[in-house]
Amino acid sequence: MSDQHDWMWSEALQMLARAERMHHQMFLPAGRRALVGWAPPVDVLETEHEVLVLAALPGVDLANVEAAIENGSMLVIAGQRVLPPELRTATIHRLELPQGRFERRVPLPPGRYESVRRSEANGCLVISLTKAAKPKTVNP
């Protein structure tokens, strides 16, 4: 019974993730919607000193991925996944990893960020946003 419950829960989570990605696609401007084919799943974690954003991008050259903070409150991650040249003439039996242009817009927790670092871990782009120190208040 536990296996069936775990399977159903996993399926439900995948459906919710797909629905969220479709929702994000719906609200892209019409011109950009045609250019963007998919959106990678992301995790956003916050510690006392930083916000970490992990974008799952297996098979993507992370050196060519753009990441920028827009209006101080939105992280935009964009790039492209392409089949390697040696696979372009192959017979495809299954193609589950989306190909083409991607973009993901990630709302950031409120605050200011002093520095942005990029790294790679296990097929994920890891973006570390260091929180700006809060000004100390002086009591009169």
Image (spheres, rainbow, N blue to C red):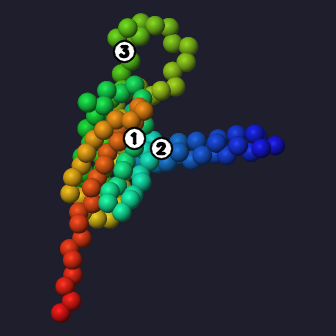
Residue 49 in which image quadrant: bottom left
Residue 4 in which image quadrant: top right
> Which residue in the protein does label 2 denote?
22
For discs 1 and 2, the disc positioned in front in the rendered view = 1
> Which residue in the protein does label 1 denote?
55
Q: Is residue 27 left or right of residue 113?
A: right
Q: Do labels 2 and 3 touch, CB within 8 Å?
A: no
Q: Do labels 1 and 2 touch, CB within 8 Å?
A: no
Q: Amino acid at mark 3?
A: Pro
For the point 39% across and 41% down, the residue is 55
The label on residue 84 is: 3
Residue 12: x %, y % from top left: 64, 45
Measure the alpha-carbon separation of dots 2 and 3.
Answer: 27 Å
Secondary structure beneath label 2:
helix
For the point 50% across and 8% down, the residue is 91
Between discs 3 and 1, the one toward the N terminus:
1
* Looking at the image, residue 62 lies above or below residue 26: above
For the point 27% across and 60% down, the residue is 131
Callout 1: few (<14), some (14-19), or many (20+) C-alpha neighbours within 10 Å?
many
Secondary structure beneath label 3:
loop
* Residue 68 can be seen in this image: yes
Q: Is residue 9 left or right of residue 109?
A: right
For the point 37% across and 48% down, the residue is 53
The label on residue 94 is: none
Most distant residue in the right direction: 1
* Residue 29 can be seen in this image: no
